[in-house]
Image (spheres, helix red, strand yellow):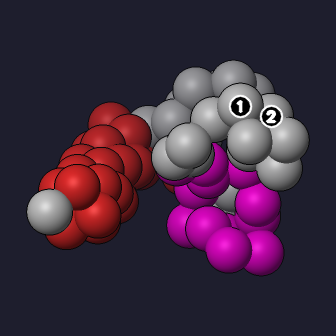
Amino acid sequence: MKQQGEIQFLIAYDHPQRHPEFYQVDAHFDLYHLTREASTRLTQSFAADFAKLQEKDSSQRN
């Protein structure tokens, strides 16, 4: 959808090579859920990436 232009901004962590810290065995509570520590790191990464997109979008509007 991003490549087709349907989504202007996309924050994705689905690439193990780019985000190996979220794909390591010790980062998972079970097969589908991150540990508290890993989920905290993911939330912090998402917040930082979201803030960067907000700044980028804001600067494009001015």
Residue 11, position as x, y percentages in the image: 52, 48
Q: In which quarter of the image is residue 24?
A: bottom right
Point out which mark residue 42 bears. Answer: none
Q: Please tell me which residue lies in front, 2 or 40.
A: 2
Which residue in the protein does label 1 denote? 6
Is residue 62 toward the left or the right of residue 34 in the image? left
Residue drawn 71% across the image and 31% down it: 6
Q: Which residue is drawn at 76% across and 64% down?
A: 16
Element under label 1? loop
The label number, if any, that marks residue 1 in the structure image: 2
Badge 2 amino acid: Met
Q: Which of marks 1 and 2 is nearer the N terminus?
A: 2
The picture places residue 26, in percent across and down from the top left corner, at 59, 55
Q: In this view, does 59 lie to the left or right of 38?
A: left
Residues at circles 1 and 2 in contact by the CB criterion of under 8 Å: yes
Asked whether 15 falls inside the magenta stretch, the response is yes
Q: Does the magenta stretch include residue 29?
A: no
Q: How many marks?
A: 2
How far apart are the two marked residues, 1 and 2, measured between alpha carbons?
5 Å
| Residue type at numbered disc 1 | Glu
Which quadrant holds the C terminus? bottom left
**Range drawn in magenta:** 11-22
- The residue under the point 83% across, 50% down is 3
The answer, for residue 48, to whether it is visible in the render is no
